Amino acid sequence: MYLKLIYKNIFRHKLRSLLTIAGLVVAILSFGLLQTVVHAWYAGADMASANRLITRNATSLVFSLPAYYRERIRALDGVNAVAISNWFGGIYKDQSFKNFFASFGVDHDIFFDLYPEFKVNPDELLAFKKDRRGAMVGRLIADQHGFKVGDVIPMTSPIYGGGTWEFNVRGIYEPKDETTVTRQLYFHWDYINEQMKKRFPRRAEFAGVFVVQIADGSRAAEISQAIDKEFRNSLAETLTETEKAFSLGFVAQTEAIVTAVRIVSFVVIIIIFAVVANTMAMTARERLAENATLKALGFGPGFVAGLIIGESIMIVAIGGVLGILLTFPVAAGFKSAMGSMFPVFYVTPQTVMMQVACAAVVGLLAGLLPSVRAARVKIVDGLRYVG
Amino acid sequence: MKIPFSYVFRNLWTRKITTLLTAGGMALVVFVFAAVLMLDAGLKKTLVGTGSFDNAILLRQSAQTEIQSSVYRDQASLLETMPEVARGVNGAPLVSRETLVLTQIPKRGSDRPQNVVVRGLPPMGLALRPQVKIIDGRMFRPGTSEIVVGKSISEGFEGVGIGQRQRFAGREWTVVGTFDGGKSGFDSEMWGDVEQMMQAFRRVSYSSVIVRLQERGDFDALKTRISGDQRLILDVKQEPLFYEEQSKTLSQFISILGITLSVIFSIGAMIGAMITMYAAVANRTSEIGTLRALGFRRSSILAAFLLESILLAMVGGVMGLVLASFLQAFTITTMNWQSFSQLAFGFHLTPQIVVTTMIFSVFMGLVGGFLPSVRAARLEIVDSLRAA
């Protein structure tokens, strides 16, 4: 009965309520999208495995390490396997965000053994290993650019120069689950190295980073220190950290942007709060006489306050639920529209929970002041009031 | 006959809470909109201010950043002989051979190291950047492991106070001074002696060579001369254009993100304006009837309500701009993707941004107020007079 009264009240001003609900849908939806963008920023860190360490040059990532470190790291206790991974900085077509994907020269023999989250077809993997210019392409870029096995991908690299490099697509790897990033092209590190030997012998036999697989994730700290100790006071000192710390280090470089997006996502909630609060203030003002009548009939102040705050919550609930439901298809559309800019983009349960929480706060706060005023109004004043 | 402006103004004034809430919502949208434009302007100002049209920068062919580039000693010496290059006292060519590397320092209040540019340069390098001034301590001495740090670095990072030491490339480097780069990209760099850096990092080539031109117009002549020389496989660019390219990706990203956000948010604010204006029309139905009966035309009613909505939006616009102008006190430090290093830049409010922002808010008011105003204008005199 009570709920029905509130429900009827909402649709007394159809247009106003519909507009408010529409605003809520937009706000809750964009809040959800922004939270998802923030989440997508941390994509690489989510995928990181506890059993992988990254060893890089201690000065900074732009310096490489001698390739023979691979053997010395492999000889250390607790290390299962070591693979070179070398940022190629390849450019496909142009330098836009849309066409961007990562490209690495890796130890083709073992690299995919270190990354079980990339599901590969054994035949394709074999073909990749046999072809010096072969490449394995992630599902995301394969879909975006329509790459098929047998295609040739021309790329240029401002780091390695040498005009156009051509890679033969030998396989397409699939993601294990939705946290897996498949926006990378992997090819033979030997291919880069061979070219460097020919053209710039001084730059040959260098690796970007080493991916170190360890048997026991709980020994990560100890093994990292052992690796760094091995190369202390050498020409190229190393810094070894877990893959997660390595990825988070990347995110930290752009932390200001993430923080800004996060702040802005709450601004939209404040904007919609202002809109809903305004609606409720107007509603309460118009119903002053009516509420006084209710009180005169013997209904308590709690009843009147409940009507207003209940209406506010119900409006927000309708808008919020619609907004949350819409977040899923819109996020999917956004992902495909952005191409490969966000390799991992899906709405997490936490995001939905935050949407619900924000909606609840807006509903309660927006209804609070008008409902208190409605509860306090003196019957005489209320009855005397004309619009 | 027009409805006087004071009528419009007083209507907003009577409903203070509603006006404030609606304008407040719009103010926040305007704030976000202006903040993005200011950030982009700040970024451009910082990077463009880094270069001067008097200077040209030379990089290895097809290298896009100084980090990727290498220029050999013999190439640098050849450049010094070119007639377009200006000469200083004693005929010494105004040429700076520089090396650029990245090191990692933690930001203040965080333990995560961030990429920071270390630039090695000869004493001549300072002559080419007159905007750079030492504000604390002294300049590094050539031939020593001393460094000076830019203002943004000294303010935002750990362990770079005067007398403190930084360890990279197998050496300890002592910080001996802080310099002010005049709000340019140099504020986010650390400087030391180029030959010391080359030895420490075991490099045989420079990253870039900066030359001062005899006259600005000599750039094309220099470019032709260099492209005609087989020994110089180098790209030559005017400094400001080079730095503008450096910011392209980041600037593009900020604009796309910002414009998308503003558009989505403005929908919320326009709905807010619409609700307010519809309520204003509904509350004043009999008033509108009276006005019409007095002889005001439909078009005057339409204009009055549209004006009210626009005025409301402008109040929001001004509030948002005032809020946004406080942002100028802040500096943002984030990674510039192209140079792969941290760059500090501020929010910069230009007259053009003020105009654009006001146009944007007027547009919001116009769109939000249009339908309600049309409804007001279409009311029939008899019906509306009876409504009360």
Image (cartoon, helix red, strand yellow):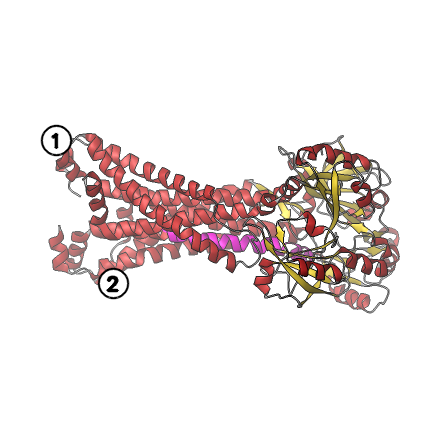
Q: Quadrant of residue B162?
A: top right
Residue A289 placement, left or right of A272: left
Query: Over which residues does the magenta segment extend?
Result: B240-269
Eye-nearest disc, 2 or 1: 1
Q: CA distance from mark 2 to mark 1?
A: 49 Å
**Residue at x 73%, y 61% (from the top left corner):** B237
Disc 1, SS:
loop
Residue B302 placement, left or right of A158: left
Q: Nearer the viewer, residue A86 or A131?
A: A131
Residue A352 placement, left or right of A39: left
Q: Amino acid at mark 2?
A: Ser
Q: Which residue is mark 2?
A: B299
Disc 2, SS:
helix
Q: Which residue is mark 1?
A: A298
Q: Nearer the viewer, residue A306 or B336?
A: A306
- Please tell me whether residue A241 is drawn above or below residue A195 in the rendered image: above
Q: Residue A268, how many percent across, how many down?
A: 42, 46
Q: Residue B171, how many percent across, how many down?
A: 82, 36
Q: Is residue B213 in view from this perspective?
A: no
**Residue at x 78%, y 68% (from the top left corner):** B224
- Please tell me whether residue A144 is drawn above or below residue B190 in the rendered image: below
Q: Quadrant of residue A42?
A: top right
Overall secondary structure of the magenta stretch?
Answer: helix
**Residue at x 52%, y 44% (from the top left corner):** A260
